Amino acid sequence: MNPITTNDALAEFCAAVASAPFIAVDTEFMRETTYWPKLCLIQAATPEHEAVIDPLADGLDLAPFLDLLRDPKITKVFHAARQDVEIFNRLGAMPVPLFDTQVAGMAAGFGEQVAYDSLVRQMLRKEVDKGSRFTDWARRPLTTAQYDYALADVTHLAKLYPKLRDRLEKEGRLEWVAQEMAGLTDPALYDVTPENAWKRLKPKRFSAKYLAAFKAVAEWRERTAQERDQPRGRILKDDAIDEVATQAPTDAEAFNRLRSVPKGFGASRMGQDLIASLTQVLGDPEAHAPDVARPQSRQPAPASVVELLKVLLKAKCENRGVAPKLVASSADLELIAISDTADVPALQGWRRDLFGEDALKLKRGEIALVLSGARVEVVEIE
C-alpha cells in the first residue's frame, strides 16, 4: 500500500468516493508531548475504494477530503470517534452525519466501550493485526507493513458498519445511536477557548475571590499550553489550580509556599505571567468572578434504593442486550433514588422507555424483582 502524498492523487480518490453512502475513517496521531494533536495519517475506505493519506507530505492540501467530511449525504463511520472528531473539527470539518461503531456496539449488546478488535472478531470473525500498534506515526518513512496495518482498521470498519447498522435497524435502535451522535458532534464539546477553560473543572468554593482566581488560573493554563504546544498537565496540574485559587498568591515567595506547583515556579517566566493575571483579577474579584450556582445541598441517596436500581438496570440491559453504561450512570441512579423528577438522561427519551419508567415504578412499589433461574425478572405487583 502506497500512501497518497500528492494533491492530484488525493483529488482522484475523493472524486471516486464522493457518491458513496458512507466512508469509514480512522486517524493516527501523536499528542503525548503536545497540546495540539499532530495528525500523522488518515485512513479512509468505502466498499469499493480505500486509501491511506499522508497529511505530513510536503504541499498536500487536505481540502478535498475535508469536503467529504462536511458532505451531509455521506455518513462518516468511526470507532471511538471523539479524538478523531476533535482533530477534524479543528480543521473546520465536523464529520456529520456520524456513526460511531463503539457507541453502536454498546446499543447492540456487545458490552461497555467495546474495543474495535473485539467488535471485528465477534461480527466479522476476523482477527485484527496488532503488530504495528506502537508505531511512531510521525516518523518517515513508514514501512509497507505499517501502512497496511493502518489501512486494515478502516477496511474492517467498512464491512462492519452495514452489518451493525442493519442489526440496530431491525431492533429499532438506530435512533438511540443518532441521539448519542448529536452530542458527540456538538462543537461545544471541543471548545478550547481559554476563557472557557474553567468550565471543564469543578470549583470547590464559591466566594468571588476564589472564583475569580480559579477562572484566571484555568484561562492562563489553557492559553499557555496552547502557545507552548504542551499538555495542560505539564503547565500546571488540576489540583494546583484549586490550591492557587484558594491561596491567591501574588508574589514569588507566596508561590514557593504552595505544595502543588514546582519549586521555583513563582520566579519563572510562567510564574510571573500567572502572578500578573492573578493580580489583575484580584483587584476586583466581583467583576471577574464567573457566575456559578452553588450546588444544592441534598440528602444522601438511600443506599438500599440505589442498590435495587442497579439490579434493575443490569436486569433490563441484560434482557434487552444493551450496555448498562449507555443507559444510566451511578450518579444517575443516585439522583433517581432521591427524586422522581431528577434531570438525568435515564429519565428521558428511549432510556426512560427502557429503564427509567420501571425505575420509578420500583420506587413506588408497583413492580418487584424476582429471581427466575439465573435471570432477574421484573414482575408487576397487583
Image (cartoon, rainbow, N blue to C red):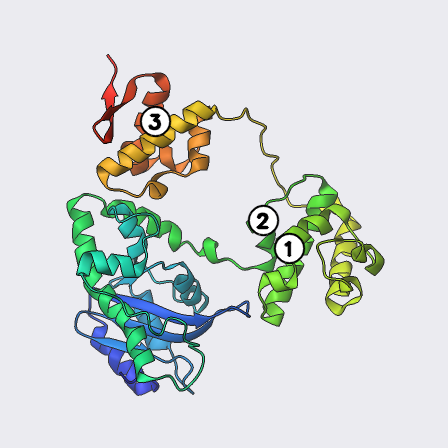
Dot label at residue 218: 1
Q: Where is residue 86 in the image (x, y as percent from the top left)?
A: 44, 62
| SS category of the residue bearing label 1 | helix
Category of crowding for the residue at label 2, using alpha-carbon neighbours closer than 10 angstroms: few (below 14), some (14–19), many (at least 20) = some
The kind of residue tagged 1 is Ala
The earlier-in-sequence mark between 3 and 2 is 2
- Residue denoted by label 2: 201
- Residue denoted by label 3: 359
Callout in the foreground (1, 3): 3
**338 or 277, nearer to the observer:** 338
Number of numbered discs on residues: 3
The kind of residue tagged 3 is Ala
Q: If the image is split into quadrants, where does the C terminus sit?
A: top left
User: Which residue: 70% across, 54% down?
Assistant: 260
Disc 1 vs disc 2: Cβ atoms closer than 8 Å?
Answer: yes
Q: Where is residue 4 in the image (x, y as percent from the top left)?
A: 31, 83
Residue 117: which quarter of the image? bottom left
Residue 230: which quarter of the image? bottom right
**51 or 94, nearer to the observer:** 51
Residue 116 versus residue 294 in the image, above or below: below
User: Which residue: 17% across, 50% down?
Assistant: 167
